[in-house]
Image: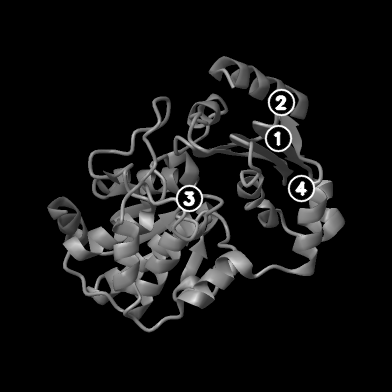
Amino acid sequence: MDRLLELLRQSSLISVTTHRDCDGDGVGAMLAFYHALQSMGLKARLLSVDPIPAKYSFLPGYNKVEVFSSQKAPATGDLLIAFDTNDSRRIEPLASWAQQQFSNSQKGQVVFIDHHPVLEKGPHPGHSSFINTQAASTGEMTFEIIKSLKIPLNTSIAQCLYTSIVFDTQLFRFIRKSPRSHQIAAELMQYDFDPTEIHRRLFGDQTPEKLRFLAQALSRIEYLHGSKVAYLELTKQDFEKQGVDPEASRDVVDMMMNVRDVEISILIRHENGKTKISLRSKGRYEVLTLAELWGGGGHLYAAGATLESADYTQLKKQALQWLQKVGI
């Protein structure tokens, strides 16, 4: 904490970001820390490597996020802090741009604040980063950092942190056998925001188009290995047919896990020339190893990967080979 506080105080401009294809944990933590920096009187800016989904527009600071473009040559300042990832590839091209700016000025660095395991075959996050794989969310870590830096909470910080925590714990379903998420949430709820409204925005704000899409998508799930594995592929045409954005499919992989006998769910989405893979496990099998085979990462039991291009048949073959290897 002393090292981080020193970095903050030495910086004339601090850039705050989160990973590509961001979610409620990263967005909430990023915005909370931005408000904390502002309350300290520090100059900060919000950067994102792709647009933040509109579902998070209720969060204070949402409209201040700038989508990074190297053509516009923004000033990253002296410090870039990335939330909810420790893999620099997930904040490209911002990471490379920042490193170039820092090397030219001989000062500045990239710091990661994250709760995912550091990949064996991925970039190392660096000695100034904060990695705590026991934390249930990055929001939980951000709360502890803000408290340790003796930054007073306010309503904006509390609302963003609460959003981060309830999103990544899925309304406290996944809390790592620790009461800490509940304890932090109880303290945050003393501030003037509506937790029920946040729950609705994150988990209940569906459209008729989304429900029609879900009905069509869930009906095509393949159940393998005696229904222990749920497998689904979604194409660009699936999204266009129902008139929904690919973002609408992000919760499908978790819905697949609600089937009683399913131990692993595998969702493959083809969108915008890329293939995105989401993996979940109920805890008997570590899906992170499968994600790493495809150059991805994440948690032991919730992971994913993004490929520039991929053949559906080949992906399914590789997945089946991995399933056989782990003995499911």
SS at mark 2 in the image: helix
The percent position of residue 239, horizontal first and vertical second, equals 79, 53
Q: Which comes before the other along the chain, label 3 or label 1?
A: 3
SS at mark 1 in the image: strand
Q: Give the residue pinned by disc 2.
A: 316
Q: Which comes before the other along the chain, label 1 or label 4?
A: 4
Please indicate whether residue 226 sits to the left or right of residue 121 in the image.
right
Q: Nearer the viewer, residue 3 or 208?
A: 208
Q: Give the residue pinned by disc 3.
A: 19
Q: Distance between the Cα atoms at labels 3 and 1?
A: 26 Å
Q: Give the residue pinned by disc 1.
A: 231
Whether residue 77 is visible: no
Mark 4 Cα-neighbour bin, 10 Å: few <14, some 14–19, many ≥20:
some
- Closest to the camera, between mark 3 and mark 1, is 1
Please tell me whether residue 266 is drawn above or below residue 247 in the rendered image. above
- Closest to the camera, between mark 3 and mark 2, is 2
Mark 3 Cα-neighbour bin, 10 Å: few <14, some 14–19, many ≥20:
many
Q: Which comes before the other along the chain, label 1 or label 2?
A: 1
Q: Are discs 3 and 4 less than 8 Å apart at CB?
A: no
Q: Distance between the Cα atoms at labels 2 and 4?
A: 18 Å
- Closest to the camera, between mark 2 and mark 4, is 4
Amino acid type, mark 4: Leu
- Closest to the camera, between mark 3 and mark 4, is 4
Q: Are discs 3 and 2 less than 8 Å apart at CB?
A: no
Please indicate whether residue 142 sits to the left or right of residue 51 in the image.
left
The N terminus - image quarter? bottom left
Please tell me whether residue 314 is drawn above or below residue 305 in the rendered image. above
